[in-house]
Amino acid sequence: MAWTRGQLAERAAEELEDGFYVNLGIGIPTLVANFIPDDMDVTLQSENGMLGMGPFPEDEQVDPDLINAGKQTITELKKTSYFSSADSFAMIRGGHIDLSILGAMEISEKGDIANWMIPGKMVKGMGGAMDLVAGVKRVVAIMDHTNKAGEPKLLKECTLPLTGTQVVDRIITTMGVFDVTEEGLVLVELAPEVTLDEITEKTEASFKVAEGVGA
């Protein structure tokens, strides 16, 4: 079975490390916050000027003035600090964020990512995506393996306007995990009960298979 959205976020949380400063993109990536281990010290950063975001609030905790970059209500922690969005982007552009986990509409076999615009259909604005893929130390993209029509989203070349070129380090889809290397994509993990034939059939991009995967 392919991973559900929740399981996809749970798998992405395995990319976190103790002491990391992390930016979570809009959509499925925000769910990663729900799977941070209790014994791990991870500090979440938001482009709108918040460092040290807490978990999503219970109904009685909701403060409409306290939101993340995706306009979702959040909570604060004892270590939380606030600052201007200019300072927030200085953190990102200055290479001070260890990891960014972003959603994607398309990714190429070279690690190009398109995640902000579908011409004629979805044009919400760039947001901070271009800065995130260019400025952080490591970029992990998570997405459905295919679109609603069942067509591959992992492609030889992206067809949508790009957010960044050759910037993605790891791709986690609902069917498996790929690393972007100098030699191309490498499949390093399959979702439970997903076969190598199934993921190959639904992937346009060329990829190699790490030893032991799909055996």
Image (spheres, helix red, strand yellow):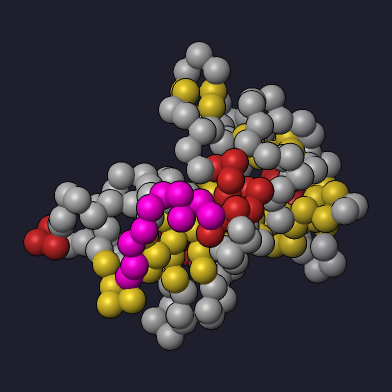
Q: Is residue 3 visible?
A: no
Judge left or right: residue 135 versus residue 46: right
Relative image position of residue 137 (x, y in whole percent): 66, 61
Relative image position of residue 192 (x, y in whole percent): 59, 61
Q: Residue at x 90, y 52 (%)?
A: 183
Residue 97 in the image: above or below residue 156: below
Is-magenta flag for residue 83? yes
Toward the viewer: 142 or 55? 55
Q: Residue at x 16, y 55 (%)?
A: 63
Residue 162 in the image: above or below residue 30: above
* Range of residues picked out in magenta: 80-90
Relative image position of residue 197 (x, y in whole percent): 75, 47
Single out the residue that lies furthest toward the top. Answer: 120
Judge left or right: residue 104 versus residue 25: right
Quarter of the image with the C terminus in it:
bottom right
Single out the residue that lies furthest toward the bottom. Answer: 39
Toward the viewer: 73 or 45? 45
